Amino acid sequence: MKTLTILGVALALASFGCDSSSGGNGGAGSQAVTIQFAAKVGVDDFVCGATYDNLGANGNSLQLGDFRLYVQEVELKNADGDYVAVALTSDENPWQTGNATLLDFEDACNDAGTPEMNTVVTGTVPTGTYDGLRFKMGVPFELNHENPATADSPLNLTTMQWNWQGGYKFLRLDSGTFSMTDWRMHLGSTACDGDPVAGGTTICDNPNRTDAEFASFDPANDTVVADFASLVEGAELDVNQPETPFGCMAGPTDGDCAPIFDNLGLPFGGSEAGTQQFFSVE
Amino acid sequence: MKRTFYILSFLLLAAGCGDSDAASAPQEWVWDLPDTVPEPRIPEDNPMTVAKVELGRFLFFDTKLSANETQSCGSCHRQELAFTDGLALAEGSTGDILARSSMSIANAGYAASLTWANEAVVLLEKQALVPMFGEDPIELGMANMEDELIRRMRDDGDYPAMFAEAYPDQMDPISLDSITKAIAAFQRQVTSFGSKVDRWQQGDATALNESEQRGMALFFGGTNEAGVEDAFECFHCHGGFLFSQSSDDAGQVFNQKFFMNNGLYNLDEDGSYPAGNEGIYEMSGDPADKGRFKPPSLRNIEVTAPYMHDGSIETLEEVLDHYARGGRLIESGPNAGDGKDNPNKNTLLTGFAMTEQEKQDMLAFLHALTDEDLLTKPAYSDPFAE
């Protein structure tokens, strides 16, 4: 009797999983999971349009007006110590498609933004207990180089497109009034190669996808924090390499990017990849 | 039940579009190309049709495609200048000055890669997104205004019918994708193979005068008066049916993208170009890529002054002097340096002796690459210019 009940629940869960999630998890039961994200600037919560002080190497102040990023390949660590993929819930969810999610902490306080916000990754994992998390900041290569004009939401936002290299801005941070002398950061893959015969992008030498891994993470109680202050630690925000965009547009020749890439755990200009400090868990 | 409803509504919609002949098969595209030229490569998801090309012509020249409705694609790509703008550096709709000179769109459907220096952008459909939505610099300035763009199209008196005709299988044909595809289709058929040199190559022995023929011989490897074979070396970068090695077509099986350094600048021991405009180095970060740009097609070169990626040479005479010297010497100022010694310079550009007659012959040949029909052809013209 008991066995039957468990079987029935498992079947119900399995069929529910197939109906509502894009991934499905085979025959085993699955459970819904929500992973919380937050944007901060040091100890303060990010509020679109607010001004934050004492940033970077020179202690500058910036009024921040955009804070959006894509995450991909979100995985939770199960009781065996193995990472399993979170199958994203993308039906009726404009923030997720394939295995990519847009996290949007701005509320259209500047012209480039949208009023709607999203601070969660939602999906399903096989029934079990989980105590660790890993993900990448980015859009998977296959989705990154598809036609953005036909892409599903959230890959159809023109302000997140990165057309000069093909692909998307994995991270978008803007400050000030969006003039050419306001500090901005847009990060995406660079040194991409296209093939006119095949008709698309073949490889990007600098994928620029940050790896984040937290061996201890409780999905029910913990939050992943993206911290602007940690991102720009050591960067001179009031100094600009001549003839480059103010801030860092991820151009491989823009030396202003070097300390920021280091904080993202990404190699820059021949440097070794360090450990990312942009994301932490609270 | 549900299915029946869908079928029913589809029938109703189909009937709705069918009050003219719009439901019939779209008129197929027929290429009108000389037999010396291959057909361009057409992406499988964007077949050519007469209706789509015509829609693309309207979109290309429509200022509704810029945020402040002051510029269209055609503002920087003017037909009478072989779809360039006569400026050294292009200017965006909000006043941003771009780093580079507007390139001709004539034969852009054959380009192995698009724009002056970009390894990644190989499709016109994707290239269109750069001027529309780019923010650094701003060109048409439409970032975050995609809904407004669609609304402008829907509210227009003519576009809904034009989109329906161009995309007869789509229930809701006005979309960003259908806009970029139509513009790409229009650009693919803006071909230019009607110059005097084309007529010569098609067998008309009267098409070129003697001076033009002498210039052509020098261009294609002839011996100059100083007795050097292939002294001018032009065709190594500007060969093929485009007069650019960076070409592609429907039958091409190899990736022919091509970028090279032609010794315009040499700011330091790395061969730097002026910052912010250093060719594919800006994408790759590899110092060996400093100053590497795509050799543009020389078709219609007479009407596309000023020259080079930054419009820094005003006349074709000066371009020839630049190559004769084997690089440009800038004696003073922020860009001082001898491009002739640029470490990344293409090894073929060693310079050459050129008599005044040889120079005039080369100019005569380059002028014979002008296709007058391109500059005036109604099918390529601005439909809003009345």
Image (cartoon, coloured by chain):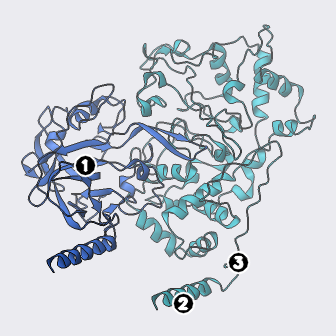
The answer to which quarter of the image holds residue A86 is bottom left
Dot 1 falls on a residue whose secondary structure is strand
How far across and how far down the image is residue A165, in percent?
44, 42
Identify the residue at the far right of this view: B205
Q: Nearer the viewer, residue B70 or A60?
A: A60
Query: Are the residues flagged by discs 2 and 1 in contact, CB closer than 8 Å?
Result: no
Chain A on-screen colour: blue
Pick the front one: A81 or B2: A81
Name the residue that disc number 2 marks. Answer: B8
- Mark whose residue sits in front, 1 or 3: 1
Q: Residues within 10 Å of mark 2 (few under 14, many from 20)?
A: few
Please tell me the colour of chain B: cyan
Residue B220 numbered tag = none
Where does label 1 land, which residue? A135
Residue A207, compared with residue B190, is above or below; it is: above
What's the mark number on residue B24?
3
Q: What amino acid type should be assigned to the residue bearing mark 3?
A: Ser
Is A249 situated left or right of B301 in this image? left
Measuring from the top left, give residue B268's x and y in whole percent: 42, 15
B212 over B68 or under it: above or below: above
Dot 3 or dot 2, earlier in sequence: 2
**From where the camera sits, is residue B52 visible?**
yes
Within 10 Å of disc 1 (Cα), the crowding (few <14, some 14-19, many 20+) is: some
